[in-house]
Amino acid sequence: MLSMSELLTNEIRYAAESRVMKAREYPDDAARNQDAATRLERIADDLSKLEGSGSHLWLEAACSRDSTKYSEALSFVIRSIGFRSAANTGREFLDDLSVALGAEHLDDAEST
């Protein structure tokens, strides 16, 4: 069974691959899509180190509370990378996800 951080990073890596394909498909927007793919890969690398951390526990709790809302927020934030979102690190991504979920609890999770 995949862990929460593995599921999250797999989804982000899939989005990065999709952005690379979009860069090829739309040469006029290739630079922006390639930049987004690079950011998504960096974010996935950062998030892959979360297992057992306060952020990991926060993600599990957010998903458990309302998996539909979590999935919608996650999809929105992933699609936003490189376009509406300037997130460049795992932490910045989680901050964006926290806002999308309407939660401000990530900082509390980090202190545990």
Image (cartoon, rainbow, N blue to C red):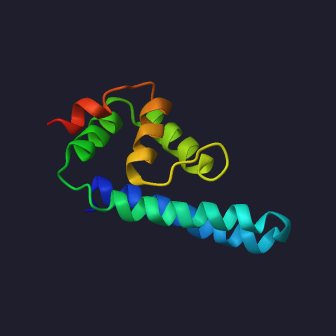
Q: Residue 103: x percent and y percent?
A: 39, 26
Q: Residue 57: x percent and y percent?
A: 22, 42
Residue 100, relative to residue 34: is it above or below?
Answer: above
Q: Residue at 27% x, 35% y: name it.
A: 61
Where, by quadrant of the figure, is residue 110 drawn?
top left
The quadrant in which the N terminus is found is bottom left
Residue 101, relative to residue 13: is it above or below?
Answer: above
Q: Residue at 45% x, 24% y: name it.
A: 102
Q: Residue at 45% x, 47% y: name it.
A: 93
The quadrant in which the C terminus is found is top left
Q: In this view, does 15 lie to the left or right of 32?
A: left
Q: Which of 19 and 46 is in front in this view?
A: 46
Where, by quadrant of the figure, is residue 47 drawn?
bottom left
The extreme left residue here reads 112
Q: Residue 39: x percent and y percent?
A: 53, 61
Q: In this view, does 20 lie to the left or right of 77?
A: right
The extreme right residue here reads 28
Counting the numbered discs, the total is: 0
Q: Is residue 19 left or right of residue 2?
A: right
Residue 64, relative to residue 88: is it above or below?
Answer: above
Q: Residue 71: x percent and y percent?
A: 47, 41
Q: Residue at 79% x, 71% y: name it.
A: 25
